[in-house]
Image (tube, grey):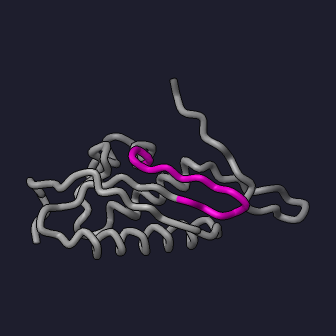
């Protein structure tokens, strides 16, 4: 059974129409921003930037939960971190990047970005 996504009005364009955004779009923005941070090997679903072109952008929302209430976003991310990276500083970088990406792209305020480290990736394919 497919999970139902909610849609929220983020702008009313005085007589022209309205702009709506779904929480899945916000989750995709968060997932993409998180995987761009050095030290993050993948989302818990095994999704990396290289796989986006093959699997489609919707796959980026796997491992991400975004909820919007009163134009405020709350995000939960489940991530895998590369072995040898500082988990605390990597998580802080993820929080800042995700917050900035959502606020810049949607105009919504981000109340919190909760990062859950699900695993440490022992076999990183990234070169330093």
**Magenta stretch, overall SS:** strand
* Left or right of residue 22: residue 87: left
Q: Which residues are magenta?
A: 61-74
Indicate the position of residue 87 as horizontal and vertical percent values.
24, 68
Q: Is residue 107 above or below residue 73?
A: below
| Closest to the observer, 8 or 84 | 84
- Relative depth, front residue between 108 and 117: 117
Q: Position of residue 31 (x, y in %)?
A: 41, 56
Q: Is residue 72 magenta?
A: yes
Residue furthest out toward the right = 15
Q: Position of residue 18 (x, y in %)?
A: 79, 56
Instruction: Please count the marks in the image.
Output: 0
What quarter of the picture does the C terminus occupy?
bottom left
For the point 40% across and 43% down, the residue is 59
Q: Residue at x 40, y 44 (%)?
A: 62
Apparent side of residue 3 relative to residue 52 in the rendered image (left or right): right
Q: What residue is shown at x 60% (from left), y 61% (from top)?
A: 73
Magenta stretch containing residue 63, yes or no? yes
Task: Identify the residue shown where x is 43% and y is 75%.
Answer: 96
From the viewer's perspective, tell me whether residue 17 is left or right of residue 94.
Answer: right
Q: Quadrant of residue 26?
A: bottom right
Rendered location of residue 81, percent (x, y): 23, 60
Give the residue at the far top of this rendering. Answer: 1
Answer yes or no: is residue 49 visible: no
Q: Is residue 110 visible?
A: yes
| Image vertical order of residue 114 relative to residue 6, above or below | below
């Amino acid at each position: 059974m497919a999970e139902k996504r909610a849609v929220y009005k983020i702008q009313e364009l005085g007589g022209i129409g309205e702009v709506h955004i779904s929480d899945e779009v916000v989750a995709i923005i968060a997932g993409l921003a998180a995987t761009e941070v050095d030290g993050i090997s993948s989302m818990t679903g095994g999704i990396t930037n290289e796989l986006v072109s093959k699997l489609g952008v919707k796959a980026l929302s796997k491992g991400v939960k975004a909820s919007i209430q009163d134009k405020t976003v709350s995000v939960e991310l489940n991530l895998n971190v590369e072995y040898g990276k500082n988990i605390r500083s990597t998580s802080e970088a993820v929080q800042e990047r995700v917050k900035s990406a959502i606020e810049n792209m949607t105009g919504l305020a981000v109340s919190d970005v909760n990062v859950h480290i699900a695993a440490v990736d022992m076999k990183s394919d990234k070169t330093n």
